[in-house]
Image (tube, rainbow, N blue to C red):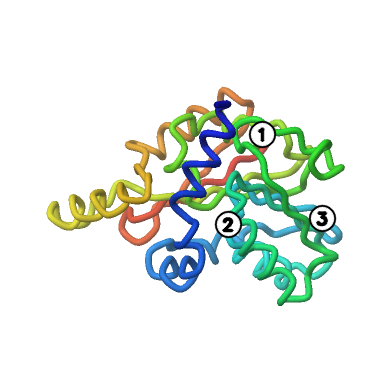
């Protein structure tokens, strides 16, 4: 079985039923997503790609916030994309949002979307689910337009939370194949520099989440 097929099967297994309650439940602990969407600052008529678009919750919100933008979504799970397509149709945004299945670590946007570069790319709570998360960032960097930016939000180290709560949080996240990246701020900054990008980071909610913005130098 290929890498992409294996990853797709794994994610489909997790979300085959979870997709029906995903948005209702994740709103309480996938914190900072709305902040990332607000910080995209999409230029007039710009293009936006979400890597790991899931149920399209974020894409729908972004489309409403930036009414002149053209949006694209990539996800490895066909199960999640089934829910996403329904969400986009109910929102009446089929003409502005295009989604397809693909590998976040290695994709050809021209073949998938007919668009080589994007003004803004965002990645929300995806990297902590991908062991080769640096490859996801590398793929994003190869598809961001000159002068563009990549926005990322993901779990932090929960440093300001009691030890018992930290252990409980890691145990809960592990049930969904989520493993927060240790020292994520320093690692994403170093990786961005290797890719020729400048990183700025912010700790949200006492280290519960980390937001990073990667820009071309």
Depth check: 135 or 171 in front?
Answer: 171
Query: Does any portion of residue 217 appear in the rendered image?
Result: no
Q: Give me the disc on residue 80.
A: 2
At mark 1, the secondary structure is helix
Tell us which disc is closer to us: 1 or 2. 2
Distance of label 1 from label 2 (alpha carbons)? 24 Å
Q: Residue at the top extreme? A: 194
Instruction: Left or right? Give the position of 32 relative to 107.
Output: left
Q: Would you call the spot at circle 1 few (<14 residues within 10 Å), some (14-19), or many (20 or more)? A: many
Horizontal side of residue 175 vs 4, given as left or right: left
Tell me the residue that label 3 is attached to.
46
Q: Which residue is mark 1?
A: 141
Left/right of residue 104 with respect to residue 181 in the rendered view:
right
Q: CA distance from mark 3 to mark 1?
A: 17 Å
At x 49%, y 57%, the residue is 16
Q: Quadrant of the N terminus?
A: top right
The residue positioned 37% from the left and 38% from the top of the image is 181
Q: Position of residue 92 (x, y in %)?
A: 78, 75
Where's residue 50, x and y in %? 65, 51
Mark sitting earlier along the chain (3/2): 3
| Disc 3 to disc 2, C-alpha distance | 25 Å
Residue at 73%, 36% in the rendered image = 143
Quadrant of the rendered image containing residue 135: top right
Residue 55 image position (x, y, % from top left): 59, 62
Question: Mark 2: which secondary structure?
Answer: helix
């Amino acid at each position: 079985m290929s890498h992409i097929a294996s990853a797709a099967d794994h994610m489909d297994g997790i979300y085959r039923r979870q997709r029906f309650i995903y948005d209702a439940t994740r709103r309480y602990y996938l914190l900072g997503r709305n902040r990332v969407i607000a910080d995209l600052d999409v230029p007039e008529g710009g293009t936006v790609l979400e890597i790991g678009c899931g149920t399209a919750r974020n894409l729908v919100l972004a489309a409403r916030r930036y009414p002149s933008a053209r949006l694209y979504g990539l996800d490895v799970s066909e199960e999640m994309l089934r829910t996403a397509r329904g969400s986009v149709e109910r929102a009446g945004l089929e003409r502005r949002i295009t989604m397809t299945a693909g590998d976040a670590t290695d994709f050809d946007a021209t073949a998938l979307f007919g668009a080589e570069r994007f003004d803004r790319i965002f990645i929300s709570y995806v990297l902590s689910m991908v062991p080769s998360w640096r490859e996801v960032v590398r793929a994003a960097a190869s598809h961001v337009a000159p002068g563009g930016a990549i926005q990322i939000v993901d779990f932090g180290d929960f440093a300001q939370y009691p030890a018992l709560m930290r252990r409980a949080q890691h145990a809960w996240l592990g049930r969904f194949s989520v493993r927060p990246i240790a020292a994520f701020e320093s690692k994403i900054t170093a990786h961005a520099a290797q890719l020729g990008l400048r990183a700025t980071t912010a700790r949200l909610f006492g280290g519960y989440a980390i937001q990073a913005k990667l820009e071309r130098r």
